[in-house]
Image (cartoon, rainbow, N blue to C red):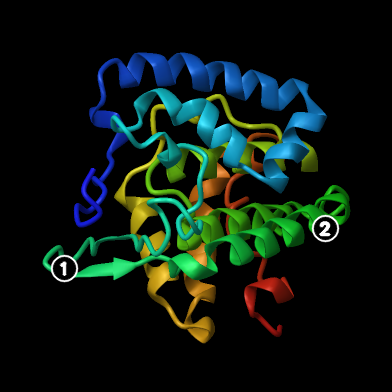
């Protein structure tokens, strides 16, 4: 490739046999998440090997580094690689994910915080447990560390953290195919675009949706909505 030729964009789902292979791989992945505690903690520490395992066969020719490499990784075609998406309500405009030079540090910090919260979350109230999972889900989406395939890793991390906390996953949950739509995509976009003091309402909206992927206490009505006396919900009553 000429040094002046830009590396290709990447949409893994356009590759041959993607859906059949990913359905099989993600079914096995979810079974392993349930069965293997060491594996759960490994992907909650560094999800690059998981991303490589899932997506190596779907990378563009000549770019194997797209699988298992964070955006911004120095010395690769992902160095300086920015990422964004069209805005849902104004598709002629786009929004950006984390700047590439910040990706690794931001993700390492976020995952360390999540791992630190796992043990106390096991004895916390259900909504506090849900918030732990929601913060993981929202921040991973905001950072968007991989060029493609972030949603699959995001859902795998969500599942791993839920199992670690002791919350059963609902039968409707899947890592593949994607089990959500614009009802979740909109608050995730809003969280990504919001300033620090504007994020809290969108956390609550995402939490309410994510509760539908959980069973156990979350099978109860209104279980995904913050209790009125919950300080985490920003209510002082």
Residue that appears at 40% across and 15% down: 21
State left or right for residue 45 relative to residue 219.
right
- How far apart, in angstroms, are the residues tagged by discs 2 and 1? 38 Å
Q: Quadrant of the C terminus?
A: bottom right
- The part of the image, by quadrant, that contains residue 114 is bottom right
Residue that appears at 40% across and 23% down: 57
Q: Quadrant of the N terminus?
A: top left
Residue behind mark 2: 116
From the top left corner, tell me how far across and down residue 86 is, in percent.
22, 61
173 or 158, nearer to the observer: 158
Disc number lying in front (2 or 1): 2
Image: 78 above or below 153:
below
165 or 73, nearer to the observer: 73
State left or right for residue 64 relative to residue 36.
left
**Hey, which residue is sitting farthest left in the picture?**
92
Q: Dot 1, crowdedness within 10 Å: few (<14), some or many (≥20)? A: few
Q: Secondary structure at mark 1?
A: loop
From the top left corner, tell me how far across and down residue 53 is, in percent.
54, 26
Residue that appears at 26% across and 25% down: 15
**Hey, which residue is sitting farthest front in the picture?**
2
Residue behind mark 1: 90
Q: Earlier in the sequence, mark 2 or mark 1?
A: 1
Note whether residue 182 is visible: yes
């Amino acid at each position: 490739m000429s040094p002046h030729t830009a590396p290709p964009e990447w949409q893994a789902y356009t590759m041959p046999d993607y859906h059949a292979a990913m359905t099989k791989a993600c079914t096995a992945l979810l079974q392993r998440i349930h069965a293997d505690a060491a594996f759960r903690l490994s992907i909650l520490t560094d999800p690059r090997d998981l991303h490589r395992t899932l997506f190596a066969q779907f990378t563009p020719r000549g770019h194997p580094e797209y699988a298992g490499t964070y955006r911004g990784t120095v010395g690769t075609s992902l160095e300086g690689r920015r990422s964004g998406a069209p805005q849902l309500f104004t598709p002629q405009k786009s929004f950006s994910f984390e700047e590439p030079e910040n990706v690794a540090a931001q993700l390492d910090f976020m995952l360390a915080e999540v791992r630190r919260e796992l043990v106390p979350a096991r004895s916390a109230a259900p909504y506090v447990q849900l918030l732990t999972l929601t913060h993981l889900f929202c921040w991973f989406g905001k950072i968007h560390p991989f060029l493609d395939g972030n949603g699959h890793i995001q859902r795998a991390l969500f599942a791993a953290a839920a199992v670690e906390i002791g919350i059963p996953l609902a039968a409707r949950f899947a890592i593949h195919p994607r089990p959500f739509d614009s009802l979740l995509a909109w608050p995730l976009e809003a969280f990504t675009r919001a300033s620090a003091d504007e994020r809290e309402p969108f956390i609550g909206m995402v939490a309410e949706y994510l509760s539908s992927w959980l069973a156990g206490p979350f099978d109860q009505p209104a279980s995904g909505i913050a209790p009125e006396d919950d300080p985490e919900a920003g209510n002082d009553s």
